[in-house]
Amino acid sequence: MLTILIIILLLISIYKARALLIRYRDSLRIFVGMSLIISRMTLDVWYVTTGTWSASHSLPLELCSIASLAAGIMLLTKNRSLFEVVYFIGIGGAIQAILTPNLHFGFPQFRFIQFFTDHFLLILAPLLMIWLYNYTVTKMSIVKTFISINVLALIIWMINYIISANYMFLRHKPNTTSLLDFLGPYPVYLLSLEIITIIVFILLYVPFMKRKST
C-alpha cells in the first residue's frame, strides 16, 4: 500500500511541476525512455545470475513487458502511433498489475523494486508526452489499440502453445490473486477481459473527451 501511495504522489508531483519541467522535457523523455529499456535488461541479467531464467516465464512476452519496451521506444522516437497504443495498454495494464501484482518478492529485493519502478515508468511515459508535448488520443486510437492487443494476444497464444508457457495468462489464471479470479473459469475470463478492456479504454479516453468539449 505504501508503494502505491508513493507512486501516486510521484505522479501528482510531476503533474504539478509540468510547467517547470517543460524546459527539460527532452532530457526527461530520453531518461525515462532509456530507463524503461534498461529496466528490462537488468531483469534479464537478474534471471540469468540467479539461475531462474526460463523460456516459459522469462521472455518479454507479458503485456506490461511488451508495453514497457514499446514505451521506451516511443519516448526515444516520439512516435505518435506507439503513443496511442502505450497510453491505453500501458496505463491500463500497469494499474492492474500494481494493484494485484503477480509477484513473489517483497521489499527490498531487486525484483520488487524493478517491478514497481518499471510499472511506475510505464504509467509515466505516456503522461509525459501528454503533459509536456501535448500528445492526444482519438476514438480511433481505441479501435487501433484494441485490434493491436488482440493480434498480439493471438501471437502470444501460439508461442505459449509451442513452448508450453502462459504469457499474458492466455492458458490459465495466475497462481496469485488477480482480477481474473472474479471473471469466471477458463476460457470465460478471456471473453470477460475483452469487455473490461473496452471499458477501461473508454474510461482512459474520457479526459480527452472533456478536453475537446472545452
Image (cartoon, helix red, strand yellow):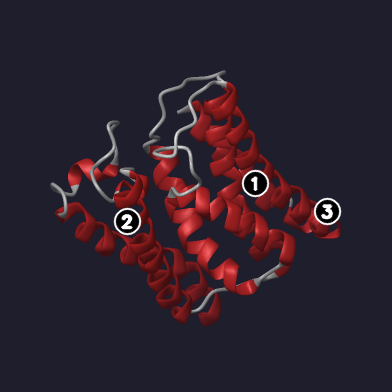
Contact? badges 3 and 2 (CB < 8 Å): no
User: Label 2: which residue?
Assistant: 157
Q: Amino acid at mark 3?
A: Ser
What x and y, as percent, mark residue 136? 59, 73
Left or right for 135, reference 98: right
Of the two numbered discs 1 and 2 in the rendering, the one whose residue sits closer to the viewer: 2
Residue 36: assigned label: 1
Q: How many marks?
A: 3
Q: Mark 3 Cα within 10 Å, few/some/many (few <14, many 20+)?
A: few
The residue under the point 28% across, 44% down is 179
Badge 3 element: helix
Q: Amino acid at mark 2?
A: Trp
Query: Of callouts 1 and 2, which one flags the residue occurring earlier in the amino acid sequence?
Result: 1
Could you tell me which quadrant the N terminus lies in?
top left
What x and y, as percent, mark residue 162? 33, 51
Query: Of callouts 1 and 3, which one flags the residue occurring earlier in the amino acid sequence?
Result: 3
User: Label 3: which residue?
Assistant: 27
Badge 1 element: helix
- Residue placed most toward the observer, 70 or 45: 45
- Residue placed most toward the observer, 27 or 152: 152
Could you tell me which quadrant the C terminus lies in?
bottom right
Left or right for 54, reference 21: left
Estimate the spatial distance between the alpha carbons at disc 1 and disc 2, rounded to whole Å: 25 Å
What x and y, as percent, mark residue 35? 70, 44
The residue under the point 44% across, 52% down is 63
